[in-house]
Image (spheres, helix red, strand yellow):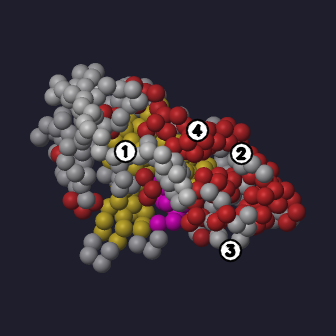
Amino acid sequence: MSNSNWDPSQPILEITNLSISFFTRLREIPAVMDFSCTVMPGEAMGLVGESGCGKSTVALAVMRDLGKNGKIVDGTIKFKGRDLTHMNEDELRKIRGSEIAMIYQEPMASLNPAMTVGAQLAEVPMIHEGMGKTEAWQLARQIVGDVRLPDPDRIIRAYPHQLSGGQQQRIVIAMALMSKPALLILDEPTTALDVTVEAGIVDLVKDLGEKYGTSMLFISHNLGLVLDVCDRLCVMYSGEAVETGNVSEVFDKMRHPYTQALFRSIPLPTADKNSRPLVAIPGNFPLPHERPRGCNFGPRCDYFEAGRCDVGDIKMAPAEGDRHASRCVKFNEIDWNAPLKAVKKQEKTPVGEVVLKMEDLRKL
C-alpha cells in the first residue's frame, strides 16, 4: 500500500518527539521520552546504547507492536509522510511485511517449526501481493540464493531445525526481503551468532541494502558493526536520544559525554592496555521510574555541573556538522581531545608452572 503522494526527496521515516510508556497496576513507566530521528531513502540509521535504553521499544513502536501495556503517549511516527500512530489495524496490516519489515534478535522465534523454509518464504508474496504459488516459490528460491545460502533447492525443502543458527538468520533476512520493503528494521540481528558468521551477515545486509535500495534502522550495542553498516548514528541513553549525526562525525567529533564514555569502554584490536586503557562508566543505569532531574546521564558524567545539568528538561541542540545534534548543555565547553587521566600501569602476568598437561591423547 504505497503512498502515491509521497515525495522521494523527503524522509522515508520521520520520528518526532516520540514518547512511549508502559502502564502497570502501580504506575506509568516512561520507556522512551522526546525521541526524534530521521531516515532518508536508501539511508542506514544505526541506533546504539546500553541494554534497556529503549532501542527495541522504538523499533516496536514503528511496527505498532507494543503489546497491551505499551502506549505511544506523545509524538508522531511518519512513514512516507503518513502518520503510523493514527492508522487502524487494517491499514497497518497492509504496510507490515510489505513496506516495513523487521528482523528480530532470535531467528527461531520468527520461523514456524512445522513448515518448510520454502513454504514460509512463499507465503509472504502470496499474502501481500496475491502472487501465484509457483511464482512465489520461484521467488523464494531466488531470494535464498541472494542471501548466499548454498544449494537453494535443498534449503527451501528443509525445516528450520535442520539449519544452523547462521542459516536461520539468513532465512529470516530473506523473508523480510521477499516483498522488497522500503524500510528494514534489524533488531540486533547478529546477537546469537559467532564472529565469523556475524561478519558474513553484516556484509550480506550491506550488499542487499544497496541491491534493493532499502532504507534501514539498524539496532545494535556493537559500535563496530554500526560503523561498518550505517550512514548515520543515533546514540540512546535511558530512553532518550543523546546524540545523533553522520557516523564519521559522531565517531570523530563526538559531542556528548555518554558517547565518549561508550567509545572509551570498547576494546580495540592490538591496542596496548596501558596507552589506551578501557575505562568503565561509573555508577549504574537508572531505573525508568528513578531517573534524575535534568540530564539522565548526570550522576555518571565526568563533566556534571550542579545548577546547570540538573535543572529542567534538556533538549537536543544542533552541533557543528551534518544534522549533528547533542543533548548536553556543556558540549561547546568540553575539551573533547583531552587525553585520558594517567592510570596505574599494569605489568604482564608472568607465566607460572604447568597446571594441566595432556600427551598422546586418543579417542577410543
| Total marks in image | 4
Q: Give me the residue at 36% from left, 67% from top.
A: 22
Q: Are marks 2 and 1 in contact (CB under 8 Å)?
A: no
Residue 75 magenta: no
Residue 122 is situated, as x and y percent measured from the top left of the image, at 77, 63
Q: Give me the residue at 36% from left, 53% from top.
A: 51
Q: Earlier in the sequence, mark 2 or mark 1?
A: 2
Q: Secondary structure at mark 3?
A: loop
Residue 346 is situated, as x and y percent measured from the top left of the image, at 20, 29
Q: Would residue 72 be found to the left or right of residue 258 on screen?
A: right
Q: Are marks 4 and 2 in contact (CB under 8 Å)?
A: no
Tag of residue 220: none
The residue under label 4 is 43
Q: Earlier in the sequence, mark 1 or mark 4?
A: 4
Between residues 283 and 236, which one lies in front from this camera angle? Answer: 283
Between residues 115 and 297, which one lies in front from this camera angle? Answer: 115
Tag of residue 114: 3
Q: Mark 2: few, some, or many residues within 10 Å (few <14, many ≥20)?
A: some
Residue 62 magenta: yes
Give amino acid for label 2: Arg
Q: Mark 3: few, some, or many residues within 10 Å (few <14, many ≥20)?
A: few
Relative to 63, does residue 16 appear above or below in the rendering?
Answer: above
Residue 301 is situated, as x and y percent measured from the top left of the image, at 20, 39
Q: Quadrant of the C terminus?
A: bottom right
Tag of residue 148: 2
Q: CA distance from mark 3 to mark 4?
A: 36 Å
Q: CA distance from mark 1 to mark 4?
A: 54 Å
The residue under label 1 is 357
